[in-house]
């Protein structure tokens, strides 16, 4: 089996708000209370209409958790992914559509994954008459795993079918999670056997697609849009904001650092750290609270620890203070949050 393409395997620190904006447009038709989707984030509804708006990847994950919790639609990922047409990918979608072959289009996508909605690393192998597309999580998706896998993999079907101009011929899809109740929707979208509880996420695809000439190929225009992609890619990989640097150190070292200790490690004064964060519209306390909040979510969702033990792990001397902080973050209590999450998780069984 020969490896022919591999994505860069890195999550960007910030991404376009485009996929979130599209998701919320779809949710409107389901009469979802949109106000609750923004809880725990710095985003405002007006941000959704700004095509130049970029958001932190962790903030995007928070929005997705809110969407999953508020919507209470188990098959939401599949419904979203199948509507993610190529026009929503902007310059990258245009560059892919105007490529000569599917191989060239995929090569672009693998190079510029920061411009997509993905939370996965991809490898494309070829053996005999088939392509083997493997997808591995770039971070532990835990409570978002099924939702994001379904959104991601159904969007792959839509993307390939859009640029080919014909349905993608898939022999087999293997997925790491257990079979959900709404299996008929999988049959409708993937139109092939789907196996669950496997060791890896994998698509087995007819290799004839790889060098199939694309119906909208245009070399001159393709170069123009590819250049736009490269410019945006370089922007996203440019110098990180101070917020990103502090956030990264928190993720690596934990949340024990005081502001003074953090400033010393970054070789700047505490006053400079405070001023520069203020210029970026954020405070050191806000960053620390975000880290604590996300850790609280993970512990409530993926462990059976008592609320008291979780509050202790998060550095609270009194569980009542944790309850109060959590209510401010989410509008609900830690116990109710865990209960809602498990009820939602059980709907897949």
Image: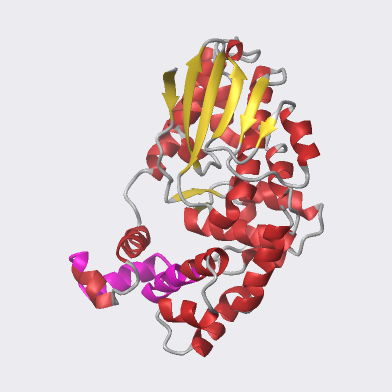
Determine whether 53 is above or below 288 in the image. Answer: above
Q: Main secondary structure of the magenta part?
A: helix
Q: Nearer the viewer, residue 323 or 92?
A: 323
Q: Nearer the viewer, residue 311 or 91?
A: 311
Q: Is residue 35 left or right of residue 97?
A: right
Q: Position of residue 122 (x, y in %)?
A: 48, 32
**Residue 83 on the magenta span:** no
Q: Is residue 72 left or right of residue 267?
A: right
Determine whether 133 is above or below 209 in the image. Answer: below
Q: Quadrant of the N terminus?
A: top left
Q: Position of residue 259 (x, y in %)?
A: 29, 76
- Residue depicted at x 28% and y 70%: 273
Q: Quadrant of residue 60?
A: bottom right
- Residue depicted at x 68% and y 24%: 162
Q: How many marks?
A: 0
Q: Position of residue 107 (x, y in %)?
A: 47, 23
Q: Which scheme is used to colour this image of the protein? A: secondary structure
**Residue 269 on the magenta span:** yes
Q: Is residue 266 left or right of residue 43?
A: left
Q: Is residue 228 visible?
A: no
Q: Nearer the viewer, residue 285 or 295?
A: 295
- Residue depicted at x 48% and y 53%: 57
Q: Position of residue 151 (x, y in %)?
A: 65, 42
Determine whether 160 is above or below 336 in the image. Answer: above
Determine whether 50 is above or below 32 in the image. Answer: above
Q: Nearer the viewer, residue 18 or 61?
A: 61
Q: Is residue 152 left or right of residue 31?
A: left
Q: Which residues are magenta?
A: 265-293
């Amino acid at each position: 089996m020969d490896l022919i393409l591999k994505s860069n395997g890195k999550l960007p620190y910030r991404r376009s708000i485009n996929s979130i904006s599209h998701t919320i447009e779809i949710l409107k038709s389901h009469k979802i209370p949109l106000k609750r989707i923004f809880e725990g984030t710095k985003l405002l509804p007006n941000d959704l209409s700004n095509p130049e708006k970029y958001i932190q990847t962790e903030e995007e994950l928070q929005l997705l958790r809110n969407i999953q919790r508020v919507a209470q639609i188990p098959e939401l990922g599949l419904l979203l992914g199948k509507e993610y047409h190529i026009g929503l990918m902007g310059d990258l979608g245009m560059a892919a559509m105007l490529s000569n072959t599917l191989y060239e289009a995929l090569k672009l996508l693998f190079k510029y994954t920061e411009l997509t909605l993905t939370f996965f690393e991809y490898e494309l192998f070829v053996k005999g008459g088939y392509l083997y597309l493997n997808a591995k999580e770039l971070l532990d998706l835990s409570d978002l795993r099924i939702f994001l896998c379904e959104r991601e993999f159904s969007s792959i079907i839509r993307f390939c079918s859009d640029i080919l101009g014909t349905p993608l011929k898939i022999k087999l899809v293997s997925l790491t999670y257990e079979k959900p109740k709404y299996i008929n929707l999988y049959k409708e979208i993937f139109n092939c056997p789907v196996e669950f509880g496997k060791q890896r996420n994998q698509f087995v695809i007819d290799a004839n697609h790889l060098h199939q000439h694309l119906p909208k190929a245009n070399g001159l225009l393709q170069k123009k849009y590819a250049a736009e992609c490269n410019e945006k890619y370089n922007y996203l990989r440019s110098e990180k904001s101070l917020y990103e640097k502090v956030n990264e150190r928190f993720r690596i070292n934990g949340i024990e650092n005081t502001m003074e200790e953090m400033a010393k490690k970054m070789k700047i004064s505490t006053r400079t750290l405070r001023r520069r964060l203020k210029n970026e519209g954020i405070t050191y306390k806000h960053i620390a609270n975000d880290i604590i909040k996300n850790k609280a979510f993970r512990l409530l969702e993926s462990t059976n620890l008592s609320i008291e033990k979780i509050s202790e792990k998060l550095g609270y001397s009194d569980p009542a203070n944790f309850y109060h902080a959590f209510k401010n973050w989410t509008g609900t209590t830690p116990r109710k949050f865990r209960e809602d999450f498990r009820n939602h998780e059980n709907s897949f069984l």
